[in-house]
Amino acid sequence: MRKVWLIAKRELGYFFSSWTGYVIIAVSLFISGILFNAFSLTATPRLSSQVLEQFFYQSSGVAMIAALLLSMRLISEERSNSTIMLLYTSPVTETQIVLGKYISALIFFIILQLISIYMPSLIFVNGKVSIAHIITGYLGIILLGSSIISIGLFASSLCSSQLLSGVVGAVMVVVFLVFWMLSSIVNPPFKDLFAYLAIHNNHFLPFQRGVISIAHVVFYLCINFFFIECSVKTLQSRRCRG
């Protein structure tokens, strides 16, 4: 675990010492703020819980993009800079490399979400919402974001270019989003299968409403485990080929 944390600290240092991390935070907060002001804080009277639900719905889209941007460089940058061989020749396993990079992006993503908490807190100025609802909504965003990070990490392990990694990761995420639309036009059993595989609508909406379901938590954890394992296998395959 010490080696995993050393790799994570190295990656976190990059996020905080370069402009990349600060730009992602600034742009994410800026877009979320605009959406929150335009669609949540409307002149139309609404319940505070409805305002909060709308905030989490909008934030989830921004969070997915931010997670993809954070993850697309994690391994592809090592390959494009030819520093991947330093990791291969170091006394670390592929699992430790992947976990270290995944944890670094996840920690930075969580920091971004903690900074954004001032927006739902504004609801308390003229209304009242449950603290548990806020916590549940952010839990959903973190689970969703962690899944996107794992997908982006896998795409990064496949590509030597950050741009190509971002495109491949975005396509994979879009496929998981499109599953929800496919579920509405196909017949069982594919209808239920596609609805279950949809990474956002079916699994995130309960968190948005303040409801925690173990089944949805397990789904996101399984997505994380699957793509992290795929990333490990990809690195192992490339290491064997030299």
Image (cartoon, helix red, strand yellow):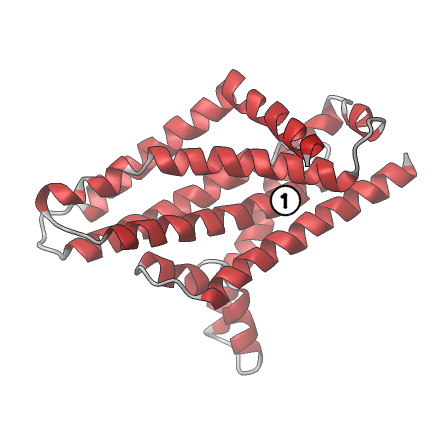
Disc 1: CA contacts within 10 A as few (<14), some (14-19) or many (>=20): many
Query: From the viewer's perspective, is 16 left or right of 124?
Result: right
Q: Which residue is mark 1?
A: 168
- Residue 111 vertical placement versus 175 (above, below): above
Mark 1 belongs to which amino acid?
Val
Front one among 85 and 213: 213
Q: Is residue 222 visible?
A: yes
Q: Is residue 125 left or right of residue 189?
A: left
Residue at figure coordinates x 66%, y 51% from the top left? 227
Q: Position of residue 82 (x, y in %)?
A: 78, 22
Q: Secondary structure at mark 1?
A: helix
Q: How many marks?
A: 1
**Placement of 52 over or under 15, stated as above or below:** below
Residue at x-position 82% and y-position 26%: 90
Q: Position of residue 169 (x, y in %)?
A: 60, 45
Outermost residue toward the top in this view: 17
- Whole-percent x, y for residue 20 in the image: 51, 23
Q: Position of residue 197 (x, y in %)?
A: 55, 65
Quadrant position of residue 100: top right
Residue extending furthest toward the bottom: 188
Residue at 25% over, 38% down:
119
